[in-house]
Image (cartoon, grey):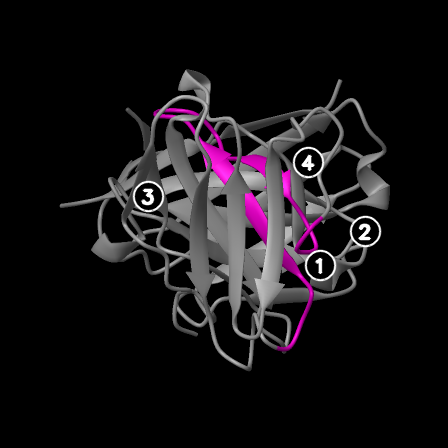
Amino acid sequence: QSALTQPPSASGSPGQSVTISCTGTSSDVGSYNYVSWYQQHPGKAPKLMISEVTKRPSGVPDRFSGSKSGNTASLTVSGLQAEDEADYYCSSYAGSNNWVFGGGTKLTVL
Amino acid sequence: QVQLVESGGGVVQPGRSLRLSCAASGFTFSSYGMHWVRQAPGKGLEWVAIIWFDGSDKYYADSVKGRFTISKDNFRDTLYLEMNSLRAEDTAVYYCARTSGTPGAGILDYWGQGTLVTVSS
């Protein structure tokens, strides 16, 4: 199973919005509304930010939102804050009891 | 609060075995499926394995199938990963994570801090 495709990096100034894409195939992202997004700060464990494409767990700021169109899912961070600087990973169910992650995107707050 | 604490990592020679543990607390362990996810140094996340809440089903990534075995002891509230025939490319931080909702949704809502496995001669 190939990894989902994410841009290696993204950036924005405080207060701006940034969108990170996650491109899969018709066998994973395109077939299931089971896309999650995780935030990982250096040396820390990943943290769930979005599940099932658009659902935000309790405690996650509403500045974080998810969407999907065809084989591509997206994470949008609005009103960027310094603490949003981290690596972000998407994941998707890929069928046949397999899950796949994206390669990760390093978000820099300028 | 939910806590997951991995242990058992270390340096191991190629071809040898290692068993990782993940001690769970703060929730009803027997009601949740669990995943192992790994991260090679400086690399991205890679899904490794999943086990159903009652241990009845287990599934593996192709890269570890036939070499790794996931199990859970619902009496000891502990998840395990038995790793055999280790290779250099298995070097990674191994995370255990709880999955909530339907297993297919892949919602990993709590993660441990990870344990480092280094395969080297």
Q: Which residues are magenta?
A: A31-54
Outermost front residue: A16
* Amino acid type at image mark 1: Ala
* Cα distance between the residues tagged 1 and 3: 25 Å
Q: Is residue A25 above or below residue B53?
A: below
Q: Pinpoint the chain carrying mark 1.
A: B
* Amino acid type at image mark 4: Thr
Asked whether the beta carbons under mark 1 and mark 3 sit within 8 Å of each other, the answer is no
Mark 4 or mark 1: which is in front?
A: 1
* Quadrant of the rendered image containing residue A102: bottom left
* Amino acid type at image mark 3: Ala
Q: Is residue A11 above or below residue B34?
A: above
* Cα distance between the residues tagged 2 and 3: 27 Å
* Cα distance between the residues tagged 2 and 4: 20 Å
Chain-order first, disc 2 or disc 3: 3
Asked whether the beta carbons under mark 2 and mark 1 sit within 8 Å of each other, the answer is yes
Q: Please name whichever residue, A71 or B116, is drawn nearer the observer in this view of the structure.
A: A71
Q: Are marks 2 and 4 on the same chain?
A: yes
Residue located beneath label 3 in the image = B92
Chain-order first, disc 3 or disc 4: 4
For the point 48% across and 43% down, the residue is: B19
Outermost bottom residue: A26
Q: Pinpoint the chain carrying mark 2.
A: B
Mark 2 or mark 3: which is in front?
A: 2
Q: Is residue B81 visible?
A: no
Residue located beneath label 2 in the image = B101
* Amino acid type at image mark 2: Gly
Q: Are marks 3 and 4 on the same chain?
A: yes
For the point 59% across and 36% down, the residue is: A64
Residue located beneath label 4 in the image = B78
Q: Is residue B115 above or below residue B35?
A: above
